[in-house]
Amino acid sequence: MKTPYKISAIFLLLFLTFSCTKEVDFDQIDDVDIHTSYLVTLVYFNLEAPDFLTSQNIEEPVQADVIQASFANVSQKYVEKVKLTILTNNEFNRDFNVEIIFFDIDQNPIYQLDPILIPANSTELTTVIEIPSQDIPVVFNTAYYGFIIALSASSDGSVLQPDDVYSLEFKSSLELFFNYKNI
């Protein structure tokens, strides 16, 4: 091998063995924060005018439903925020008031949200309620959710009829926001 090739080969070998990177700090893993969320669909219903009438066509302005909580196996250790989202579409010419109540395993009320007003003739209304951080443990003690939907009285004294074509669409979900970090 000729001398210039030897020098080039040695230079190339030296160049490839030295790098310009800094040391790897494996302790950085202690500073990792992983943010994610978990969405739980709570309840969906579509109530029509006949749903607010008895079999004798007498107006019954309150409907109620209780559902079981569906995230019993979720750990609350890393939950930093909880949001309840309600999507409504009210075709009635009357307001609705919705109450949401949290119940324990024995169906005793343990928490209640402020009532939600759904205005008459409102389309695609979104209501977002953030559960205060000090109340997040209540969410994990909840075994059932109760929904009470109350139809307000009409301003002109009219009552619903079985052939009225009004409807109230109601969708709700609960979103848990997690921050997994090394503690």
Image: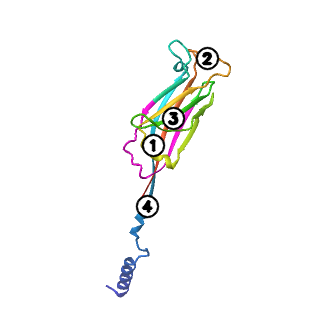
Residue at which label 2 appears: 159
Residue type, numbered disc 4: Val
In this view, 105 is above or below 23 = above
Q: Secondary structure at mark 2?
A: loop
Nearer to us in this view, 69 or 9: 69
Q: Which residue is mark 4?
A: 32
Say few, some or many: other residues with alpha carbon within 10 Å of mark 1 (under 14 / 14 to 19 / 20 or more): many
Give, as a single range, the part of the protein colored magenta: 66-88
Within the image, what quadrant is residue 129 found in? top right
Q: Nearer the viewer, mark 1 or mark 2?
A: 1
Q: Nearer the viewer, residue 145 or 47?
A: 145
Pointer 2 or 4: first along the chain: 4
Q: Position of residue 81 (x, y in %)?
A: 49, 49
Is 50 inside the magenta-drawn segment? no
Q: Residues within 10 Å of mark 3 (few under 14, many from 20)?
A: some
> Are the residues tagged 1 and 4 within 8 Å (C-beta)?
no
Location of mark 1 (residue): 139
Q: Earlier in the sequence, mark 2 or mark 3?
A: 3
Going from the N terminus, do you reach mark 1 or mark 2 first?
A: 1
Element class at badge 1: helix
Question: What amino acid does circle 3 point to?
Answer: Ile
Up-down relation of residue 113 to residue 10 (above or below): above
Is residue 38 visible from the viewing direction of this image? no
**Which one is earlier in the sequence, the residue at label 1 or at label 3?**
3
